[in-house]
């Protein structure tokens, strides 16, 4: 409910129109998919196998990621050491890292010719096979362990320092801390983290494309790609797309059902205190956990850099053309995402339609990008050549993927800017562009830069919609890298991975840091 009378400005009205367009852009292809599915009764045994594998790998990935994240988050919450902030920042790197680069790093470590298999062969201990269920789960754990750790760490850090002080005065032992603090916080945060990661893993495409792919290791998204790309069976692709939506919506409803608030109450924001009964053994255990997690997350990135740097300057011209195409597409997609998100966030600044706009963000997550791409192909196919529009469609879908993250960053900042600067702007008669420039945008600079950086990094690393219906000469860098890898040009693929990783992290850094210039002024 609005706290004071606030007329809807032109920019806010634009936000409402944009929100409606986003809903139509997502639901229109979904309706086209449902219409094209024709009957919804013809699932083949291979499709049921894909559904079972999707649910199995997503469940295992979520379970392993969260179980491994518990000791890591616990150690980070209890310890203060030099480089702790850098370590926590490292946890964010896999989130913006292109998935195909992460997979290349894991192959360098766990692949048939990787470091671990070479060591195992050297001592006659056999080898491990990364392709199939093990590899898919391993890659998902690598990508989602940091996210699970950050989610659980917030639960530990939400325990007020005053509660820790009281526990110390009562001479609590470790078992008392687990009973009164850690089990309740895990009960509050773990179900949500499990379901969010399960949802992410059900829509994973690039991981299954490279590390799965066989009859026994095909996900629903990969089955959609195969039905579309190899069989050109639009009806089956549409039907599988509908199944994918049902899985995502089911997981989303479960995540919403199990969302619980913290039960520890608010504190006075005092610095965290050392936990009671902090033994030497506990400190050694935390050190071992943090060392293992850091090694697991950092080693694949170092492997990509070490094996690919030497090949960068020998890359073929087509790779550099693909890199330029990806950067152009990422900038266009970022501009579109920001152009959509900013008016929508400002619409909520006057306490209007917040629930509805957050629903638009959830809709973007629930409907898989591959399903949206399939639906857009079905819509465009009768009136134009979809292949000729593959890059604009990819840019549009990438912008929709980034939209929830931009809204999540901008909406609280826009509400705070309106609350603190709105009355003064009203008193000075500031309207339209002047109000936006002098009262609102300076307060949105940081979240806007962060969200734009995420959007650019996501678009640079995308290997989904572009793989559906691109033609020769339209490859983005991730697709070019995948084709180099598929044609056994491993050195060139590793060089392309270094370029892709550098461009993704570089674009994120430029947007994020660029928004902080003169931020203190």
Image (cartoon, helix red, strand yellow):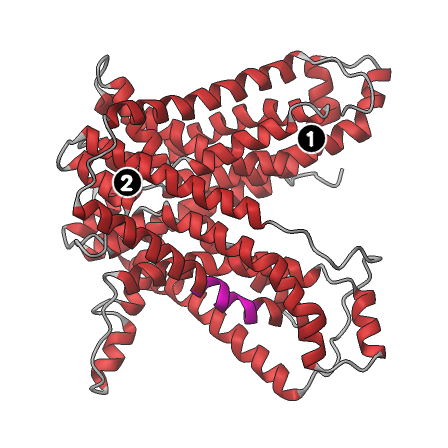
Q: Which residue is mark 1?
A: 414
The chief SS type of the magenta part is helix
Q: Which residue is mark 2?
A: 320
Disc 1, SS:
helix
Q: Quadrant of residue 167?
A: bottom right
| Residue at left offset 45%, top offset 31% | 400
Residue 448 belongs to magenta span: no
| Residue at left offset 42%, top offset 45% | 504
Separation of marks 1 and 2 at Cα, in angstroms? 39 Å
How far across and down, in percent of the image, does residue 248 sit?
41, 42
Q: Quadrant of residue 276?
A: bottom right
Viewer-closest of 117 and 211: 211
| Residue at left offset 72%, top offset 71% | 180
Residue 71 belongs to magenta span: yes
Disc 2, SS:
helix
Can the viewer see residue 85?
no
Q: Quadrant of residue 181?
A: bottom right
Relative to 200, is 425 above or below? above
Magenta span covers which residues?
Answer: 64-72
């Amino acid at each position: 409910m609005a706290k004071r009378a606030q007329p809807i400005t032109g920019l806010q009205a634009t936000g409402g129109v944009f929100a409606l367009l986003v809903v139509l852009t997502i639901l229109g292809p979904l309706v086209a998919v449902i219409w094209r599915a024709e009957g919804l009764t013809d699932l083949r045994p291979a499709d049921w196998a894909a559904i079972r594998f999707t649910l199995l790998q997503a469940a295992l990935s979520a379970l392993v990621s969260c179980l491994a994240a518990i000791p890591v988050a616990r150690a980070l919450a209890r310890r203060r050491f030099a480089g702790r902030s850098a370590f926590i920042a490292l946890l964010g790197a896999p989130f913006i890292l292109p998935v195909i680069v992460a997979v290349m790093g894991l192959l360098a470590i766990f692949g048939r010719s990787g470091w671990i298999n070479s060591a195992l062969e050297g001592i006659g201990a056999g080898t491990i096979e990364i392709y199939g269920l093990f590899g898919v789960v391993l890659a998902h754990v690598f990508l989602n362990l940091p996210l699970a750790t950050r989610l659980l760490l917030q639960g530990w850090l939400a325990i007020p320092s005053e509660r820790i002080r009281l526990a110390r005065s009562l001479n609590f032992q470790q078992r008392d801390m687990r009973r009164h603090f850690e089990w309740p916080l895990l009960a509050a945060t773990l179900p949500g983290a499990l379901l969010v990661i399960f949802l992410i893993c059900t829509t994973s495409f690039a991981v299954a494309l490279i590390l799965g792919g066989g009859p026994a290791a095909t996900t629903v998204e990969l089955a959609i790609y195969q039905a579309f790309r190899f069989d050109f069976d639009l009806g089956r692709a549409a039907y599988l797309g509908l199944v994918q939506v049902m899985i995502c919506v089911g997981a989303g409803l479960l995540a919403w059902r199990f969302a619980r608030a913290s039960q520890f109450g608010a504190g006075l924001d005092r610095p965290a205190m050392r936990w009671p009964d902090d033994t030497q053994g506990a400190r050694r255990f935390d050190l071992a956990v943090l060392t293992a997690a850091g090694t697991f997350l950092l080693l694949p990135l170092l492997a990509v850099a070490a094996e690919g740097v030497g090949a960068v300057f020998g890359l073929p011209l087509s790779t550099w053309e693909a890199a330029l195409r990806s950067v152009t597409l990422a900038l266009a997609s970022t501009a579109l995402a920001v152009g959509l998100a900013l008016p929508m966030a400002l619409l909520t600044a006057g306490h209007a339609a917040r629930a509805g706009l957050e629903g638009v963000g959830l809709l973007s997550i629930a409907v898989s990008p591959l399903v949206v791409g399939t639906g857009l192909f079905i819509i465009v196919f009768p009136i134009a050549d979809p292949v000729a529009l593959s890059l604009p469609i990819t840019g549009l879908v990438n912008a929709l993927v980034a939209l929830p993250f931009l809204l999540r960053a901008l909406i609280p900042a826009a509400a705070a800017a309106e609350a603190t600067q709105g009355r003064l702007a009203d008193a000075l008669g500031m309207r339209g562009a002047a109000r936006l420039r002098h009262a609102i945008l300076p307060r949105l600079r940081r979240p806007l830069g962060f969200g734009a950086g995420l959007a650019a990094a996501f678009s640079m690393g995308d290997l989904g919609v572009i793989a559906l219906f691109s033609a020769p000469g339209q490859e983005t860098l991730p697709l070019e890298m995948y084709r180099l890898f598929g044609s056994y040009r491993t050195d060139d693929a590793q060089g392309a991975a270094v370029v892709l990783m550098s461009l993704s992290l570089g674009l994120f850094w430029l947007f994020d840091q660029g928004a902080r210039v003169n931020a203190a002024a």
